[in-house]
Image (cartoon, grey):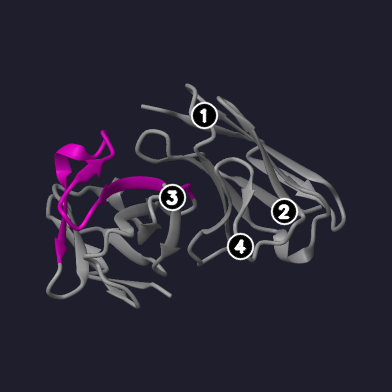
Amino acid sequence: DIQMTQSPSTLSASVGDRVTITCRASQSISSWLAWYQQKPGKAPKVLIYKASNLESGVPSRFSGSGSGTEFTLTISSLQPDDFATYYCQQYNTYSTFGQGTKVEIK
Amino acid sequence: QLQLQESGPGLVKPSETLSLTCNVSGGSISSNSYFWGWIRQPPGKGLEWIGSMSYRGITYYNPSLKSRVTLSVDTSKNRFSLKLSSVTAADTAVYFCASIYDSRGYWFYWGQGTRVTVSS
């Protein structure tokens, strides 16, 4: 099984900050990685697919990078609507999610 | 625009079988454009993939749940279903149905989720 490990688990930041979340895979997944945003009581929403491709309608302040086993999600300038929990998901072999990173207000 | 809606009991007794249905609207469950699946989220925890299937019946299951999970499709009612047997309190979670679109591999469409509690 492919395990996905995110860091940090919680991140405290202010509006306007640059934020980076890391996701590591236990084996190479090429670029088969997606990032999701989830708000309380809601279903997740995809932000990035294939590691670095921005889903249609997602603000350009979100970006993704990486390949193989190391990936990052960056929010260039944190906005009030961005306080949420973020998950990575590999889809190289079946589907596995990271444990999540909660972005909270500092 | 595809829409998914979960339905089923909100309370299941330990050792019994959890059964949920996902009703699909805005698209055909028989379309080759979609892959269907279930994902769950225990209270205060992260997302766990349960399983995925095509309308033709090709299925993939999370190895940790495989022995207890059955997925099925009902093309006549445009819906798909999850059965999870021998449930315990650890199966208490919000259950989401979701869809992969156009072989992209990631979960693009989601239902709103339904909370299932396992308790006597």
Number of numbered discs visible in the structure rendering: 4
Q: What chain does badge 4 belong to?
A: A
Give the residues in magenta: B45-74
Look at mark 1 in the image and give the residue it sits on.
A30
Quadrant of res A100: top right
CA neighbours of label 3 inside 10 A, class few (<14), some (14 to 19), many (20+): some
Report the amino acid beneath label 2.
Answer: Glu
Estimate the spatial distance between the alpha carbons at disc 1 and disc 3, rounded to whole Å. Answer: 14 Å
Residue A70 pos. (x, y %): 61, 27
Where does the image place residue B44, in percent across and percent down from the top left?
49, 52
Residue assigned mark 2: A104
Residue type at mark 4: give it: Ser
| Amino acid marked by disc 3 | Arg
B16 falls in the magenta region: no
Front residue of A92 and B110: A92
Q: Residues within 10 Å of mark 1 (few under 14, many from 20)?
A: some
Discs 2 and 1 carry the same chain letter: yes
Give the mark nearer the N terminus: 1 vs 4.
1
- Same-chain status of marks 4 and 3: no
Residue at x-position 74% and y-position 40% = A20
**Does mark 4 fall on the same chain as mark 1?**
yes
Residue beneath label 4, please?
A56
The answer to whether residue A74 is above or below residue A47 is above
* Secondary structure category for the residue under label 2: strand
